[in-house]
Image: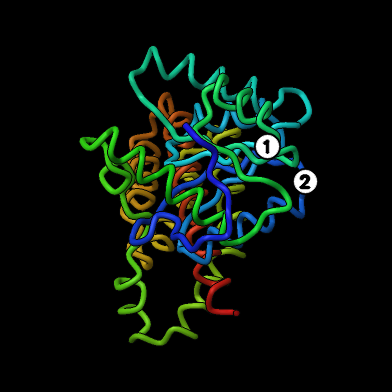
Amino acid sequence: MAACDGDGAGTAGEGRSLRVLIAEDNEVNRALAVRLLARRGHEAVVVGTGLEALAAWEDGRFDLILMDLQMPQMDGLAATAAIRDRERARATYTPIIALTANAASTDEARCLAAGMDAFISKPVRIAAFYKAIAAVLDRDAALHPEETILSQVPEVFDLKTALDAVDGERELLSGMIAIYLRQTPRVMQDIDAAMAAGDAGALEIAAHKLKGSVAMFGARAAREAAQHLEDLAETRDLSQAQAARGELGAEIERLTAALEAVRAEDER
């Protein structure tokens, strides 16, 4: 597949809410990628090494991966090859776009050989960034029509439900999101402390509190995950609590990233 780069206009998954893994160890580059994705309403999960990228891919479902080539511990080529090997056993496929400062033909060949779909040259040009993503996603949808991006990823939260809760006042919603972002890490700490102490009562209270917070935003998956942990605590059987905590943590990360993107858009 030819690399996608250029100045032409393009949209990155227009009409879709994407979950994108960014594997990039340069803070400036990844901050730009996060911001550009947020402009299109997409959620970004950021890691700084190839090993972290592989672990994140194992733990969560992504529509797209932006993979830097040069990272510590494991580079982007090795991480991509590892992902492709595991995908073959699972009959799944995640589009991967390389991020590279060396846009030579030899680098393109290396990227494609490792299993990447395209690459974006750094420093990133905004139009090229969106165009490359749109081209890869369009091609992936054509190759896998039964597994479109929209059907793979449920909506993280319901903006209409959240706005209805505050009578349509976007400024008030932004304030509620800020409170959620401050409060949730503390509640998650309470959950972890209760689990470490084997305190089912405290765990039930903390999970119930979190459930109420995420429900306001219409975050169905996060609410169900919190409810599951609360139910386990209520029965005083914590044998499955660790797995439930992992599921809840993943959903809270997704919701937090989505809400942060909404708030960032409001602050522009």
Q: Residues within 10 Å of mark 2 (few under 14, many from 20)?
A: few
Query: Residues at badges 1 and 2 in contact (C-beta under 8 Å)?
Result: yes
Residue 125 vertical position relative to residue 23 in the rendered view, above or below:
below
Q: Quadrant of residue 35?
A: bottom right
Residue at x 35%, y 70% (from the top left corner): 159
Which residue is at a point 75% across and 31% down the rendered structure image? 70
Q: What residue is drawn where x is 78% and y is 28%?
A: 72
232 or 154, which is in the foreground? 154
Reading the image, the residue beneath label 2 is 26
Q: Tell whether 22 sits left or right of 19.
A: right
Three-letter amino acid code at the position of disc 1: Asp
Q: Secondary structure at mark 1?
A: strand
The front one of 163 and 47 is 47
Give residue 224's position: percent from left, percent from top: 32, 47
Direction from residue 65 to residue 145 in the image, left or right? left
**Residue at the image point whose x is 50% and y is 35% from the top:** 2
- Provide the residue designation for mark 1: 68
Residue 131 horizontal/vertical position (percent)? 49, 54
